[in-house]
Amino acid sequence: MSRIVVDEEKCVGGGQCVLAAPDVFDQDDDTGTVLLLDADPPAGQDAAVRQAARLCPAVAITVATP
Amino acid sequence: MVDVRTVPDEAGSLPRFPMPRETPFHPPAAYARLRDTAPVSRVRLWDGGTAWLVTGYDEVRAVLADPRVSSRRQHPGYPFATPARAAAERGERAFISQDPPGHGRLRKMVTKYFTVRRIESLRPVVQDIADTVIGRAAELGPPIDLVREVALEVPARTICHLFGIPAEERFFFQGRDHTRNALDSSPLEVEAATADMLGYAADLVARKERRPDESIVSELVRDQLHTGAVDRDQLVAIVRHLLAAGHDTTANMIALGVLELLRHADQLDELKARPELWPNAVEELLRYISVFQISPNRVATEDIEVGGVVIAAGEGIITPLAAANRDGRAFPDPDTLDIHREARHHVAFAYGVHQCLGQPLARLELNVVYETLFRRLPGLALAIDTDRIVVRQYLLSSLGELPVTWPVNR
């Protein structure tokens, strides 16, 4: 199971995470900044979440595997 | 006019940058040779200076994500690919030419207009524009120049819609940005075109102050200029930059994408039969074409180590996205177009904090235009031999024209 941390300060609003894992990430309508919908998503989301972290241009997503 | 390829390399030993393409369909072969032996290596520039050319995927991402490199065009070590690029970029005041934290403050003023959700809500608008443009091209009858009739039209009309610009004004900004982006424009021509565009952006801001509408420019005036969050010169620079970034890039991707699809008929047939494949095909086309071919550039602000090489503070760095996107370590069999491959990790929109802000809009336009074009004109074919196709000497990979035809039943 993943544990996800996002850094809103680093986020540049590219939307890569929303495209990769729309059940886990969203963007704030007023700022475009990342919104973490689910910090502990089900295992079925692991690949999508890893993809989101890899694609994030600002390296603002950290995925810890306990 | 300055032909950058005829400038002699007085030092002799270093390869010169930019490097010529051997064929229209692939980046310079030198990128692959360098990547295998020295993915971070020195090149000589037009002004006699040197810069580090980065040709590996991992190395390009590492540089572009490194907080110890600067995007400031005013930095004395910032490398420009040609005299025209120096003239075009040296005075840049938009966030593209700033570093954190100032960069983020300005960029965040506009990120809300390009979120995935907000852009998706524009799909009916973009579809309507594509239907109109492609419908008129079909009425013109074959043959047509796809660049002029379709590729230039959809992005320009879309940005006009977003910015509240009358559509007939598109020819003004298309012409100026073409001059700015042509690598063989003279510095004087580029400076004149840049002054025209800054004047145009200033006038657009003033128009929206007098008559506010629903456009992005009006919102920026109300929320940023009139609140004092941004000064007028900075807003004008941002509007000029967004306008330029919003049409020429996507226009060239449309034309080159259609060319590649017509050159790969089996894959095109699959897409016509299974339109749900378009989003993945668009990612692969973005990777394969890498329209932003000789940029972006950076300058190190501290000594950094990349790919086993130490880049010293003050040295220029060039990270061609076309080189990274053809790295076989990131994309097996990289010189083959494969609409089924996993290409999502391409860097066609760059990487790092300056990664393209408008990428959801670009994706939307490309998906809508390709799908609509090949649905409306399924018999579309090249009306020119592929060996006569010329990719221009341009900031972007670019086609001057793309003659196409299709069967007409009367």
Image: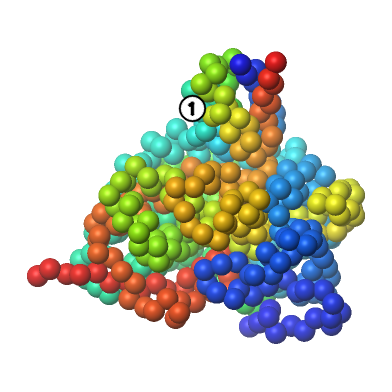
The residue at the point 48 percent across, 42 percent down is B360
Amino acid type, mark 1: Pro
Q: Is residue B336 left or right of residue B126?
A: right
- Position of the N terminus of chain A, as image quadrant, is top right
- From the viewer's perspective, is residue B213 above or below residue A48? below
Q: Which residue is mark 1?
A: A22
The residue at the point 85 percent across, 52 percent down is B308
Towards the viewer: B180 or B5: B5
Q: Quadrant of residue B46?
A: bottom right
Asked if residue B211 can be seen in this view, the reply is: no
Q: Position of residue B263 (x, y in %)?
A: 40, 66
Asked if residue B58 can be seen in this view, the reply is: yes
Q: Is residue B116 left or right of residue B132?
A: right
Secondary structure state at the residue bearing disc 1: loop
Towards the viewer: B106 or B48: B48
Q: Position of residue B352 (x, y in %)?
A: 68, 43
Q: Position of residue B23 (x, y in %)?
A: 55, 74
The residue at the point 17 percent across, 69 percent down is B408
Q: Is residue B300 left or right of residue B162?
A: right
Q: Position of residue B103 (x, y in %)?
A: 70, 42
- Position of the C terminus of chain A, as image quadrant, is top right
The residue at the point 56 percent across, 67 percent down is B26
Towards the viewer: B268 or B359: B268
Q: In which chain is the residue bearing label 1? A: A
Q: Is residue B136 left or right of residue B61?
A: left
Towards the viewer: A17 or B299: A17
